[in-house]
Image (cartoon, rainbow, N blue to C red):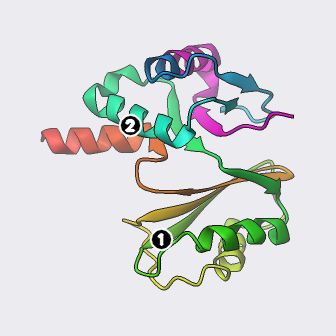
Amino acid sequence: MEEANLLVTFDPENRFEARYEVEEMLKEVGEEDPNFLCSRVHGLFQLHVDMDPKEIAKKLDSLCREDPSRFWYTYHWIPVEKWCSSTIEEMSRIVKEFAGRIQPEERWRMRIDKRLYEKYHTQELIEELTKHVDRPKVDLENPNKTIRIEIIGERAGLSLLKPREHFSVNDVKDEVLTTKK
């Protein structure tokens, strides 16, 4: 069964416009045939794309910096490297693997977003999962790498991302506006 490798959050009141925006932006960066998978979460598209989703995020980040007005309905474009059960044991296994890809001198952070999941509070998850990252330089503001965990019910999508490998429309718009002042 095909799994999502790109998550896109959007304004649920404008689902059709958001889908059109996703399709058009993906075409513009070279992804011709995105597969929209079933999503139980309002405001979240789960897609499988053929291109590297991290490269897609970087290209979209650049497009938004050139012309922020092209993005109206989507908010976050999040690549997913691996899926697992949303148990602490399974997520810990992947976090340990990702920790090995963070160099000792690199700054890192963990970000968790939960949907349809109430087993643990976000802070409890962060405390438990960061135990498996033996890298001393935590930086919540300007990390070299982010361990991104997207929990959707019984499943969790995890990625280790460099800056601009995950794309936040509002963050880019804020940066562009600040730079123009």
Residue situated furthest left in the rendering: 181
Q: Is residue 2 above or below residue 121?
A: above
Q: Residues within 10 Å of mark 2 (few under 14, many from 20)?
A: many
Stretch of the chain drawn in magenta: 1-24
Q: Which residue is mark 2?
A: 61
Left or right? Give the position of 168 relative to 110.
Answer: left
- Label 2 sits on a secondary structure element that is helix
Residue at the (67%, 39%) spot, across then down? 5
**Count of numbered circles in the view:** 2
Q: Is residue 125 above or below residue 19?
A: below
Q: Which residue is mark 1?
A: 108
Query: Where does residue 134 sit, x and y in percent of width and height?
Result: 58, 84
Closer-to-camera residue (19/95):
95
Type of amino acid at the residue the image marks with label 1? Trp
Type of amino acid at the residue the image marks with label 2? Asp
Query: Where does residue 164 sit, x and y in percent of width and height?
Result: 41, 47
